[in-house]
Image (cartoon, rainbow, N blue to C red):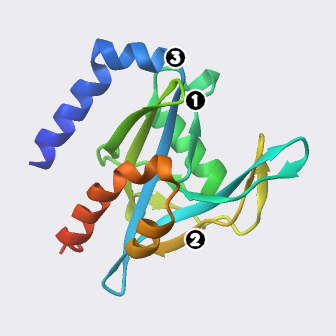
């Protein structure tokens, strides 16, 4: 089953339609999860836009960001770079398959790709300081349970909630 899913994802990423989209603007985001004392937790962070020097209202979202010149046509490179910049974590360099695509959406003239990343696929320590990134303030990444995510996730990412619920219902891998 997992192998079939990965084959479909590879075919999707290599498809001409997606390659066309990847030639344009895209956003890669990491849905990092782990099980804490039998409860599912996700790594979220609050970000707040900055306009004319004024910090706007923060919103909870999964870490991620837009491709840069060096990321062209490689969403995994974008994911890895954004994960490091926003959380301090790095994807482990192992023989594991690339993270699976949890969801995709067309949003505000660009494609958004959300990758499911188990915490065990990451190494490093979560960032411990507030930082500024382009036109945003990035608050500390925090582990939040599924219920918190369901109540507080930024509405543009709410389409992921049914898939997050499936992860919760499956339970921890044994």
Tell me what residue is drawn at x 52 percent, y 43 percent.
80
Residue 94 placement (x, y as % from top left) = 37, 49
Residue 26 placement (x, y as % from top left) = 51, 28
Give the label, 3 or 1, closer to the camera: 3
Which type of secondary structure does the marked residue at label 1 adopt?
loop
Tell me what residue is drawn at x 78 percent, y 41 percent.
135
Tell me what residue is drawn at x 20 percent, y 70 percent.
169
Question: On the image, numbered disc 3 is attached to which residue?
Answer: 24
Q: Is residue 147 above or below residue 124?
A: below
Residue 83 placement (x, y as % from top left) = 56, 50
| Residue 60, image quadrant | bottom right
Q: Is residue 106 above or below residue 167?
A: above
Question: On the image, numbered disc 2 is attached to which residue?
Answer: 142
Q: Earlier in the sequence, mark 3 or mark 1?
A: 3
Q: CA distance from mark 3 to mark 1?
A: 9 Å
Are the residues at dot 1 and dot 2 in contact (C-beta closer than 8 Å)? no
Question: On the image, numbered disc 1 is attached to which residue?
Answer: 67
Which type of secondary structure does the marked residue at label 2 adopt?
strand
């Amino acid at each position: 089953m997992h192998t079939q899913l990965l084959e479909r994802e590879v075919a999707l990423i290599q498809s001409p339609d997606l390659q066309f989209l990847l030639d344009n603007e895209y956003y890669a985001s990491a849905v990092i999860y782990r099980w804490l004392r039998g409860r599912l937790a996700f790594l979220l962070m609050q970000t707040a836009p900055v306009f004319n020097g004024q910090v706007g209202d923060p919103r909870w979202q999964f870490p991620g960001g837009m491709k840069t010149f060096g990321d062209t046509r490689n969403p995994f490179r974008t994911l890895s770079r954004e994960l490091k910049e926003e959380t301090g974590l790095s994807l482990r360099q192992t023989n594991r398959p690339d993270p699976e695509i949890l969801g995709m959406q067309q949003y505000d003239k660009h494609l958004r790709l959300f990758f499911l990343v188990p915490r065990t696929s990451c190494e490093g320590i979560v960032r411990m300081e507030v930082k500024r990134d382009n036109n945003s303030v990035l608050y500390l990444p925090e582990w939040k349970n599924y219920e918190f995510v369901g109540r507080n996730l930024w509405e543009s990412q709410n389409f992921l909630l049914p898939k997050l619920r499936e992860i919760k219902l499956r339970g921890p891998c044994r």
